[in-house]
Image: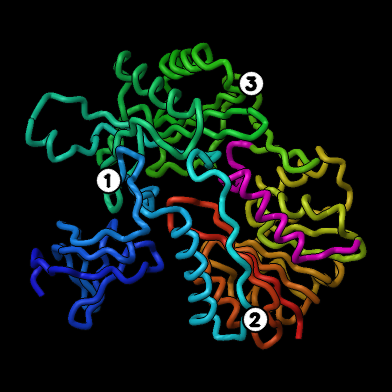
Amino acid sequence: MKASKVIEKLEITGVSSDGKSVGRHENRVIFVANGAPGDIVDVRIVGKQKKFLLGEIIHFHEKSADRTDPFCEHFGTCGGCKWQHIQYNAQLKHKQDHVAHNLAKIGKTALPELLPIKGSANTTYYRNKLEYTFSNMRWLTREEIEDNDELSRNALGFHIPRRFDKILDINHCWLQGDPSNQIRLAVKAYAEKNELTFFDLKKQEGLLRNLIIRTSTTGDLMVILQVFYEDQSAITSLLNHLKDGFPEITSLLYIINPKQNETFYDLPVHTFHGEGFIHEEMEDLRFRIGPKSFYQTNSIQAYELYKVAREFADLTGDEVVYDLYTGTGTIANFVAKKAQKVIGVESVEEAIVDARINSELNQITNTTFLAGDMKDMINANFVKKHGHPDVIITDPPRAGMHQKVVEMINEIKPKKLVYVSCNPATQARDLELLSPVFEVVAVQPVDMFPQTHHVENVMLLKAK
């Protein structure tokens, strides 16, 4: 089938694992951007692969009852919030179905009926962390290109999907509450007024690289400016402008990063104003979050997620608990008062330092935190030294657990395994490997990211 061919009256019948809407024509799958199940549309083919086609909607014959009007002016161009056009209750249904499909198809084991997905109380302004990129190659709309006006090409915003070198300049982002938008706009306006150079992603030159804004439910506010080289006069002037204009900033930091990527975990972070960290609270616990710390990006919904994990663990006070991929020890500290002891393991040394500090901050004395590669750490000697776990809680990254870790969990065979996942597909893959030793007794999806296809899922498994 030729690209640019139009298929008339295509019915959108479902949603793919990566959030695209799906239709079928002549036994071929067509992935369609910004469709909703129930739409009847004319679609122009814009790309093709061996097993599927890519299409864009050019005309609606019928609109799905699940549709709603997108609220963001950047919808359709920005790579985030791709489900704005779908009502939230329908989003939750698709996410629940996505979890069930993955566990059944990939996990290949008997499952109980899934518990109803826990929706997010906030469907906008729910993120506590956003990262913006500076660029001197702003993404231009067709109208801007056609007008050929002498417009500024500077941008401070998000990467265009599949275009590393093009940045969409953001006017208003609905993901993070005030004063996030005001800070970003103030930084850009000051930089342009004072002729500070925006980074060129292709040529690898320019001063300003990246802006990170982190907020918390305590009211703490962290801003991190990342620059390509040291220009102390320019850095100091810009940060003083922020400090004076936004007195609510409690942690104002900067990083000099001459590398070819924006990662800064191996670089020093300089404190310009305030403390080098912020705090988050959950129940009676207080957590310190540094610039390199991981913390769930939806603070309020993270509490719901961790409550599910704690409920599934059902601790009585006598248990030895392993918390794998512990990060900054949030789950470990959250369940510690109901356990005999908790051993948290994480590969990032800085995160383990934060985890220990968080225990000290909350006067928790029954936790131990260790840094190292999970597949090398968890072995018979580890169990001999720290005690056989009654419960293992695991919250791996999107890639899931390393096969050696899964095999060791099977060998250790705790009474309970609580598996928290941000990727039901890799969770299901691991489930298949765990199924000879464990059975699934409860499954609870949790929506952490409204307006997107992403979903968290918590499984409780018990030893057979």
Picture layout, residue 444 above or below residue 364? below
Q: Picture coordinates of residue 50 (x, y %)?
A: 21, 78
Amino acid beneath label 1: Thr
Q: Nearer the viewer, residue 55 or 403?
A: 55
Residue ID for mark 1? 77
* CA distance for labels 2 and 3: 47 Å
Residue ID for mark 3? 274
* CA distance for labels 1 and 2: 41 Å
Q: Nearer the viewer, residue 338 or 36?
A: 36
Q: Picture coordinates of residue 317 (x, y %)?
A: 91, 61
Q: What kind of element bears circle 3?
A: strand
The residue under the point 18% across, 39% down is 141
Picture layout, residue 154 above or below residue 115? above
Amino acid beneath label 3: Gly
Q: Residues within 10 Å of mark 1 (few under 14, many from 20)?
A: some
Picture layout, residue 5 above or below residue 264? below
Amino acid beneath label 2: Leu
The residue under the point 40% across, 28% down is 229
Q: Nearer the viewer, residue 64 or 376?
A: 64
Q: Nearer the viewer, mark 2 or mark 3?
A: 2
User: Quarter of the image containing the N terminus?
Assistant: bottom left
Q: Earlier in the sequence, mark 1 or mark 2?
A: 1
| Residue 309 highlighted magenta (yes or no) | yes
User: Which residues make up the magenta segment?
Assistant: 290-316
Q: Earlier in the sequence, mark 3 or mark 1?
A: 1
Residue ID for mark 2? 434
Q: What kind of element bears circle 1?
A: loop
Q: Residues within 10 Å of mark 2 (few under 14, many from 20)?
A: many
Q: Nearer the viewer, residue 343 or 69?
A: 69
Name the side, left or right, on which 266 lies relative to 142: right
Q: What kind of element bears circle 2?
A: helix
Q: Are marks 1 and 2 in contact (CB under 8 Å)?
A: no
